[in-house]
Amino acid sequence: MARPWPTGLPWRGGRSIVSGLWHASGGTHPTIYIPVTITFQPDDFLPGPLASPAALPGWQQVHRLLAARAHAPLELTELVGLSTYYYFTYKELGMPLDAALAQRLLAQLAQQLAARPAAHWPAPYFDHARAVAWLAPRLEQHGFGVPVAGPLLASLDQELSQLTQRWHRQPDTLRRPAFFQAVRYAGLRYPAPAAAEALHYLLAAPLLGGPALHWPPGEQPLALGLGGGLAAELLVLMGLARGASPQPALRGYVREGVQQILALKRAIDFPEQHYGLFPYQVHAPHREPAFSTELSWRRGDLGQALLLYNASDLFGDAELAKIAELVGLNTLLRTTGAATHVASAGFERGAAGVAHLYGRLYRASNYLPKYRQGYLTWLGETQRWLAQELATDVHRQRAGCLPTGLAGSGLVLLAAATGTAHDWDTVLL
C-alpha cells in the first residue's frame, strides 16, 4: 500500500508499514476493519540526537496490541489515551488511517461525556474533557474534525464562567484541585471568549493569591511532582504566562511557588539512601516533608529539574538553570531498582516516563550530552521491562491508558524510533 511521506519527517524512503487496521465501507454496508501489516526497517529513519532504531521492534509490538485494543469496548481513560496515541502516530507517520481512528475515538469520548450533565460529573470527567479541548482543535487542523466536541466544550465554557463568578462572590468555596482543573481547561480553550474571560479572572488577584492556593484545607498533604502536584501546576501556569495570560500576579505566584519548592531541598546522602533532593509531598499543618526513593514521571527530582529549567527560561534567571543542572545530573547516578523503585516499562511510574523526562531535560538544557545518555539508558530499560510484560500479558486490560498502560510507553518508543520529540505529556499535567 503506497502513500506519500509528509515533508519534513526523517524518512529515507522504501517500504513503510505499521501494524494496524484499515477500514472500508460502501453503500449501506457497515464499516469493515481489515488487518494490515506495514513494516519499517531500522534504517528507514534518519538519525536524530535522540534517535534509537533499536526501539522500533518494541514499538511495533505495542502498536499491534493497541491496534487491536482500539476496536474493543473502552473505558474513558483508554479513549483519552488511544485518541492521543493515534493522533501522534499520525503526526509521526502521516497515515490518514491513524488520524481517522483518533477522530473516532475522541468522538466516542465526547459523546460519553455529553451524556451526563456536567453538574454531576465526578472529578476525572473534567480531566477527560481537557483531553477533548486539547485534541479536537488539533485534529480539525488536519481535516479530521470532531463535530460532537463543539457543543460539549461550549457548554463547559459556560459552566466555567458561572463557577468563576461564584468563586469571586464566595471565595471561601474555592478549593485548590477545582481551581487548577478550571485553569487547565480554560488555558486549553483559550481564546474562546467565555474561557478567555474566565481565565482572566482566575489568574488575577485575589483568587490566585488566596490562601486556599498556598495550602490545601484541612490535613490534606500537598503533592509536589508532575502527577497532580505543585510542579505540574507551576508548569501549566508558566505556559500561560508566556502566552494567554502574561499578568504580573501570575508571574509572582509562579516565582513564589518555585522558591517554596527550593526551600524544601535537602542534602544527598547515598549511604543513608537519601537519593532525592526534594520531597514528593508536604503535610499540613507544619509543612513536614515526606521523601521517597521513587524516580519517575509522576514524582521525584526529574520533574523538579524540568520545572527549574522552565523557570530559568521564563525569568531569565541563570542561577535557576545551574540548580536545575545540579538536580538533573544527580539523578543520573541512580540506576538501580533500589535507588529508583522503577519496576515496569510504564510511563507514570516506570522506565518509559524516566526516559521521556531525560529527553525533555536534554532539550531544556540546550542539549547537555549527559541527559542524552540518560535517555538512551532508560530507553533500554523500557525495552527490557516491556519484553517481560508482553510475555506475561500484564496489559490485557486498559492497555490504552496513557499513564499506566501501553499507550504512553508506545509514544516514547515511537519518538525514539523516529528520532523526533513531542511533549505530549502536557495533556497529563
Image (cartoon, rainbow, N blue to C red):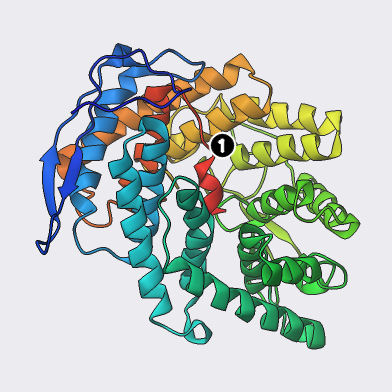
Q: Quadrant of residue 262?
A: top right
For the image shown, how many numbered marks are present on the structure? Answer: 1
Q: Determine the secondary structure under disc 1.
A: loop
Give 315 or 354, whichever is nearer the viewer.
315
Q: Position of residue 4 (x, y in %)?
A: 32, 25
For label 1, count other residues whose C-alpha is less than 10 Å away and answer few (under 14), some (14-19) or many (20+).
few
Give 346 or 43, whichever is nearer the viewer.
43
Residue 215 visible in the current orientation: no
Specify the quadrant that holds the N terminus. top left
Question: Seen in the image, is 259 located left or right of residue 302?
Answer: right
Residue at point 53%, 86% (across, down)? 119
| Residue that sits furthest to the right in the current view | 248
Residue at point 70%, 76% (across, down)? 217
Q: Position of residue 338 (x, y in %)?
A: 44, 36
Q: Quadrant of residue 162?
A: bottom right
Give 177 or 377, whichever is nearer the viewer.
177
Question: Seen in the image, is 90 located left or right of residue 250?
Answer: left
Give 129 or 10, whichever is nearer the viewer.
10
Residue 234 visible in the current orientation: yes
Q: Which residue is mark 1?
A: 273
Residue at point 19%, 59% (across, down)? 72
366 shown above or below 83: above
Q: Position of residue 252 (x, y in %)?
A: 88, 54
**Type of amino acid at the residue the image marks with label 1:** Gln
Q: Position of residue 417 (x, y in %)?
A: 37, 24
66 shown above or below 166: above
Q: Quadrant of residue 116?
A: bottom left
